[in-house]
Image (cartoon, grey):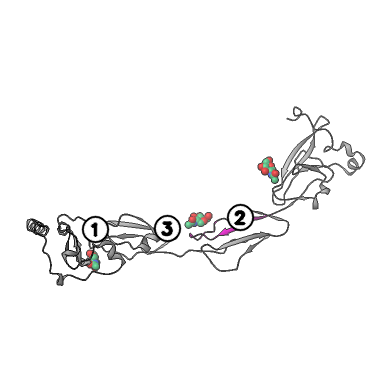
Amino acid sequence: MDCALLLLSLWALTGTVSPQAPGSCTERLLGEERSRTCPRPCKADRDCGNKRQCLCDGQCGLSCVAPEAQSPEEPAAVQTCPLPEEIINTFSIQGDATAGTAIRYSCLSGADIVGNSENFCQDNQTWQYPHPICKKAYCQPPGEVAQGYVVAVQKTEYEVGFDIHYLCKKNFLLDGPQKVTCLSNGNWSASPPYCRARCLIPAERSRVVIGGVKRWPFDVTDAVVPHGENVTFYCKHPRKQCSFAASKTCFDGKLQPPACYLEPTWLQYKLFPHRLVSEIEACEPDDVE
Ligand SMILES: *[C@@H]1O[C@H](CO)[C@@H](O)[C@H](O)[C@H]1NC(C)=O
Ligand SMILES: *[C@@H]1O[C@H](CO)[C@@H](O)[C@H](O)[C@H]1NC(C)=O
Ligand SMILES: *[C@@H]1O[C@H](CO)[C@@H](O)[C@H](O)[C@H]1NC(C)=O
């Protein structure tokens, strides 16, 4: 028995397929979407190899189909609705687009959806609704920075990927990002930075330790330290003739001396410079509790 005869006898057994004359078959609906889900187009059986036949396949028109796939009782191929490449590249899709099921879209960019975020794949392999779109994101102008500058062209909105740089005025230290980028969710990559003020060293007649160096405040340029700098002061032991160290950190222009610190008087400084607390012996570790 040759192949065609075998197939003919299969049709006879199932009795469900009534091959249509090629002339009465609809033209294949062209376009990206149909080519994805339709079998190979054909004009005659010889275009289809020996397992398939050139038959009319609904909206696909004449196609190479396995004869049993035509039987309504046992569909061989799962029916799905088309998902164009552009949609797959734009959305994360929940669901497998099978006929009779729903899918959910979410924008890969994190942007909001315009349209239906859910769709239903109908039995005739068409979607119930048009595919939604992802809202094009823009960032609002970023925050101003006190004592600083926003380095960017002024706009009412900024496109995704746009960078904005920040600078601080002289003597202010940037605390935070130097640059922020407009993200695809419409947010900036970070909050604006702060421009932090320097601190005046709150001591005059004592040496202090700044950056590991013990020095007189008047020897420090402008007698100031940058934001974030630690300053170590010397305090006198309440009972013994020795000193211990106490540190404070400059924060945005504010630097309080530690409570134990006493500023020497002008006379003490002038007459007994070697007895200043910052100049006497350090207490033994045991003395300081
Ligand atoms: C598919 O089915 C739906 C609902 O049954 C119908 O509204 C729509 O017109 C059909 N589309 C095609 C192309 O047959
Ligand atoms: C954008 O930033 C705000 C504030 O930090 C946050 O509440 C919001 O969730 C962010 N938006 C997105 C889409 O991530
Ligand atoms: C200041 O001291 C703190 C801890 O006491 C330390 O974490 C910080 O790094 C110090 N800052 C500088 C500028 O040395």
Q: 246 or 219, which is in the foreground?
A: 219
User: Is the CB–ligand 1 distance for label 1 below 8 Å?
Assistant: no
The dot on residue 108 is 3
139 to the left or right of 29: right
Residue 3: percent from left, percent from top? 12, 57
Amino acid type at circle 3 is Leu
Point out residue 114 in the picture as x, y percentages from the top left corner: 40, 64
Q: Are marks 1 and 3 in contact (CB under 8 Å)?
A: no
Could you tell which of marks 1 and 3 lies nearer the N-terminus? 1
Query: Residue sitting at 37 percent across and 58 percent down?
Result: 105
From this viewpoint, which residue is outermost toward the front? 2
**How far from the left and from the top, in percent, is residue 95?**
32, 54
As measured in the structure, the alpha-carbon distance from the residue carrying label 1 to the one carrying label 2 is 52 Å
10 Å crowding of disc 2: few (<14), some (14-19), many (20+): some
Q: Residue at label 2?
A: 177
Name the outermost residue toward the bottom: 23
**What residue is disc 1 on?**
79
In contact (CB < 8 Å): disc 1 and disc 2: no
Q: Nearer the viewer, residue 127 or 68?
A: 68
The location of residue 61, given as percent across then percent down, is 20, 67
